[in-house]
Image: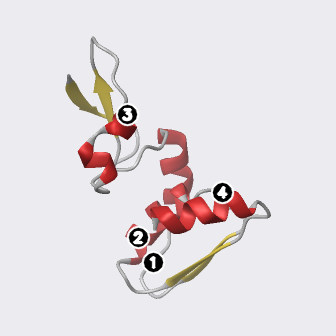
Amino acid sequence: MSLVPTDYSPYGVRIIQKKHFNLLETDEFRNGWFEIQDEASQLAALEVRAEPGDLVMDYCAGSGGKSLTIAHQLQNRGQIFLHDPRQKAITKAKQRM
């Protein structure tokens, strides 16, 4: 297995492997060392261009993947409000946060 930087996102990596395995079952994932997100979602979150001190509304937050990328941009100074009409998605977002 090897890791290769994504083409456009400064945060993403692609996993190149010959044998299939489930990343969700790794200790590293369970311990919160990484999140799984496609590169397009990373780029969409980066286009928000959030800065420390901003207040950000993620109106269709789903399970919060883009909000996690936006939170990184805020550098622990600012606030993100998540909204989604699907309660199950918001519950998942709370777990990820």
Q: Secondary structure at mark 2?
A: helix
Amino acid bearing label 3: Asp
Residue under the image location 25 percent in, 30 percent down = 4
Q: Are marks 2 and 1 in contact (CB under 8 Å)?
A: yes
Between residue 13 and residue 26, name the one nearer to us: 26
Quarter holding the N terminus is top left
Give whichever of discs 3 and 4 has the lower sequence position: 3
- Label 4 or label 1, whichever lies nearer to me, is 4
Q: CA distance from mark 3 to mark 2?
A: 20 Å
Secondary structure under the numbered disc 4 in the rendered image? loop
* Distance from Cα at disc 4 to Cα at disc 2: 19 Å
The residue wearing badge 4 is: 62
* Residue 24 locus on image (x, y percent): 39, 39
In the rendered image, which residue does mark 2 sit on?
73
How far apart are the two marked residues, 1 and 3, measured between alpha carbons?
24 Å
- State which tag comes first along the sequence, 1 or 3: 3
Q: Looking at the image, which residue sits at the far top? A: 18
The image shows residue 61, relative to residue 73, as above or below, that is above
Q: Where does label 1 land, which residue?
A: 51
Q: Secondary structure at mark 3?
A: loop
- The residue pinned by badge 3 equals 7
Q: How is the image coloured?
A: secondary structure
Residue 22 as seen in the image, left or right of residue 4: right
- Asked which quadrant contains residue 84, the reply is bottom right
Tag in front: 3 or 2: 2
